Amino acid sequence: MYPAAVRSLAVRLQSIRERNDWRSLRRKLADRFLRTFLRAEVSRVVWLEADAVAATVGHPDYTFRFLTADEVALYSQDPAYELSPAMTDRARAGRDLCFAALSGDKLAAFGWYALESIEPEHADGVALSYPPDVAFMYFGFTHPDFRGARLHGQTMALALQELSKRGVTKLVSMVGWTNDASLKSCWRLGYQDLGRMIAVGSRHNAFGLYPRKAKALGVKFGRRAKRRPTA
């Protein structure tokens, strides 16, 4: 009976191993520990240049374009889109742009792009500023009815094509280091990994360790970042 029990346990462990990525599981456990006991967040800082993105033609079933502030206000009335009234104010100020994929009049997916700088609450607790040819991509969203169509990657590629017409030829963003699905989407699109950012403290006022590669490209973090003027 004993050898049979050992074999049964081995089979069960093998089955668990086949269904799970142990490296991913260890990272998620480490991430939970860092968040709970150290109030720390770890993110990958990623960077995309227009030249690295192949010319993209949007899926013919969708319309891809920037939304107006009035459209953002309209869609924010539907809680499914998770758009707060503050996002309308950001769009009206003109330094945050929302690029979207629309199916008829239904908002299928969108991403937000901040020019010049971004506040800490939108960047894992750390303020950022960057050169004028760079935008910070944040708050990507795909409506549940349209998930699985890889709209997130398409909207980013097409947004960068449109931003390039305005002189913005690079994107910087942050992705949680355990968010494998989003990271795969980034690598597939052509993003470069600039390294890990470790932010400790409040999401609104953290301090941290920042990747040298990002600093070399003109990205400034924390106290060195140029803050947006308050209204």
Image (tube, rainbow, N blue to C red):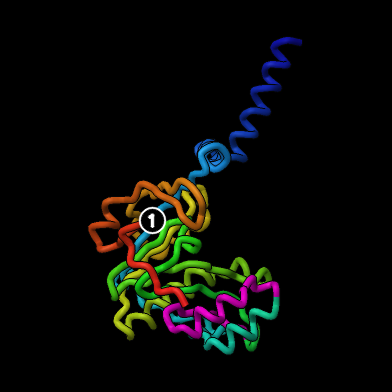
- Furthest toward the top, the residue is 2
- Furthest toward the right, the residue is 1
Q: Secondary structure at mark 1?
A: strand
* Residue 162 at x, y percent in the picture: 39, 83
> In the image, what residue occupies the spot 33% across and 67% down?
226
With respect to residue 106, does 213 lie above or below?
above
Q: Nearer the viewer, residue 134 or 193?
A: 134
> In the image, what residue occupies the spot 39% across and 50% down?
197
Res 49 visible: yes
Does residue 146 belong to the magenta stretch? no
* Residue 78 at x, y percent in the picture: 70, 78
> In the image, what residue occupies the spot 34% across and 57% down?
223
Looking at the rendering, which quadrant does residue 76 occupy? bottom right
Q: Is residue 201 left or right of residue 13?
A: left
Does residue 91 belong to the magenta stretch? yes
Which residue bears the numbered disc 1? 45
Looking at the rendering, which quadrant does residue 116 occupy? bottom left
Amino acid bearing label 1: Val
> In the image, what residue occupies the spot 41% across and 65% down?
189
Q: Nearer the viewer, residue 57 or 172?
A: 172
Q: Quadrant of the N terminus?
A: top right
Task: Give, as a single range, the part of the protein colored magenta.
Answer: 79-103
